[in-house]
Amino acid sequence: MEQLLENFSLDLFVKQTILFVALIFLLVKFAWKPILNSLNDREEGIKDALDAAEKAKLEMENLQADNERLLKEARAERESMLKEARDMKNKMIEDAKEEAREEANKMIAQAQASIESEKKAAIADLKSQVANLSIDIAEKVVKEELSNKDKQMKLVESMLGEATLN
Amino acid sequence: MKASLKKVSFLSICLVWSIFTYALGSSEGMKSGDNDPVNTEEEVNDYIQHHVKDSHDFHLFDYYSNGEKHEVGFPLPVILWGENGLTAFMSSAFHHDDSGEVVVERNGSRFVKNHGVIYELEAGAETVEFDSEHHPVNATKPFDWSITKSVFGILLMGLLMLIWFGGLARQYKKKAVPTGFGRILEPLVIYVRDEIAKPNIGPKYRKFTGYLMTVFFFVWFLNLVGLMPFGFNVTGQLAVTASLAIITLIIYLFSSNKHFWSHQLWMPGVPYLIRPLLAVIELAGTLLIKPFALMVRLFANITAGHIVVMSLISIGILMQKDMTAFGSTTLSLVLAMFITLIEVLVAFLQAYIFTMLSALFIGMAVEEGEHH
């Protein structure tokens, strides 16, 4: 302790205190304040720039997501349009087929009807011709049969015999 | 790293050179006296004691030729405030005398220098007389405003800090990132702010960075300068460390808040009977123990470092008989180089610890209590 006190010099203590306090004030004014202010400004600037970059990145991501969505929508729309077109095509073909079938059926039916009527006319014609022919034949036969009186009489008798009077 | 290596290699060159001259001197025969180099145990002890103290002139080294001692150095101004007002002269007027023999007469006052202290003789006294404890009896001590070796160191380092950090501050006006030497200083400034001020003080750190930065760089640079050959032991002066510790004390006392004092004087959460006892302990800690510890830690570490380095160098002189000149020189060189490297670390460490503890004490004083 005595050694410590002997080492202590009040003169130097006073000089050091005055010089050091002066040094603090000078350095604060000319060095620490401007240095710390500039460092703070710079750090703030870096932070702002980083934030801005982050924001830009987010925006970019949003934009990309939008693009993706739009692309997907467009693709879906194309898909649906294609499907619609295909459906329509199929339907048209189907319709056309149906129509053709109906037309054909109609034509067949018409043809059948006309065949039927032709057939009927032919049959009627045939019938009338057969009737005429049979009348002619019958006339000729009757003419032949009724050429004498006896035979006429006999016929009348047989017919009368057949005709039962009730 | 490169700079410190350079410094160490420079130091070792100086070591080799100084030991070589010692070896030459001692080979002529081991007689002690004023006209031969420092080569006995007592002389080495005196030399070391003298070296760690402040002095009135800047002594670089001695050399001996033809049995005569030549001191190389330069004088520093002596400024005294004594009986007859202000007196100023160069320290060379004492002719390197440190035992009170040379009397300097200026301005109607007579001055002598004894063990690094300048005394003013009482009126009529021609020579200084000492009592049995070697204190002068017929002289008073004037207030000493001299630019001593330590004051020279403080002024030089203050000037360098103003130039370096002022230059760094000016660089920011032109560019965002400093170049040259400023690029080395900037990370150090950021280090002190982010690793010492911010974590220990908290959100109010900005107000105290001025002091913390100044004290950190002042102590660190002066510690390093103390390690250099021909350097000065400023941070190993008790008066300097006491001044720094008391400035820390004043700062944390004046910035302390109600919360701090309520915990100092009437500690909540402990039994009422213990509270006065705790208050005494806390007050002793705050007002005495903390600044005292700051003061002694820095002083003792730096002084001890100087003494150890010089003792290891003196191995080269004192152990020549046992180990031959080559052996003792090699041993002292290797050990001194090793310790000097450690001292480079200690120089930083002590500056860091002083600043960190100052920040911690300030932080305790300005801390806002959690409102229960």
Image (tube, coloured by chain):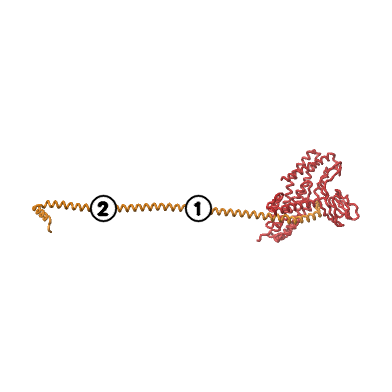
- B303 or A78, which is in the foreground? A78
Q: How packed is label 1: few (under 14 Cα within 10 Å), some, or many (20 or more)?
A: few
Which chain is orange in the picture?
A: A
**Same chain, labels 2 and 1:** yes
User: Does residue A118 appear in this view?
Assistant: yes
| Amino acid type of the residue tagged 2 in the rendering | Glu
The chain that hosts pointer 1 is: A
Q: Give the percent coordinates (x, y) of residue B56.
A: 83, 51
- B289 or B227, which is in the foreground? B227
Q: Give the percent coordinates (x, y) of residue A32.
A: 72, 55
Give the residue drawn at x 90%, y 54%: B125
Q: Nearer the viewer, mark 2 or mark 1?
A: 2
User: Does residue B274 appear in this view?
Assistant: no
Say which quadrant the C terminus of chain B sits in.
Answer: bottom right
Q: Which mark is residue B156?
A: none
Q: How packed is label 2: few (under 14 Cα within 10 Å), some, or many (20 or more)?
A: few
Q: Say which element carries label 1.
A: helix
- B307 or B83, which is in the foreground? B83
Q: Which mark is residue A72?
A: 1
Reading the chain from its start, which is encountered first: label 2 or label 1? Answer: 1
Give the residue drawn at x 47%, y 52%: A78
Quarter of the image where one finds residue B27: top right
How far, Cα to Cα, is label 2 from label 1?
67 Å
Give the color of chain B as drawn. Answer: red
The relative height of residue A51 versus residue B42 in the rendered view (above or below) is below
* Tag 2 residue: A118
Q: Give the percent coordinates (x, y) of residue B271.
A: 69, 60
The single residue placed furthest to the left in the displayed view is: A150
Say which quadrant the N terminus of chain B sits in.
Answer: top right
Q: Give the percent coordinates (x, y) of residue B293.
A: 75, 53
| Amino acid type of the residue tagged 1 in the rendering | Lys
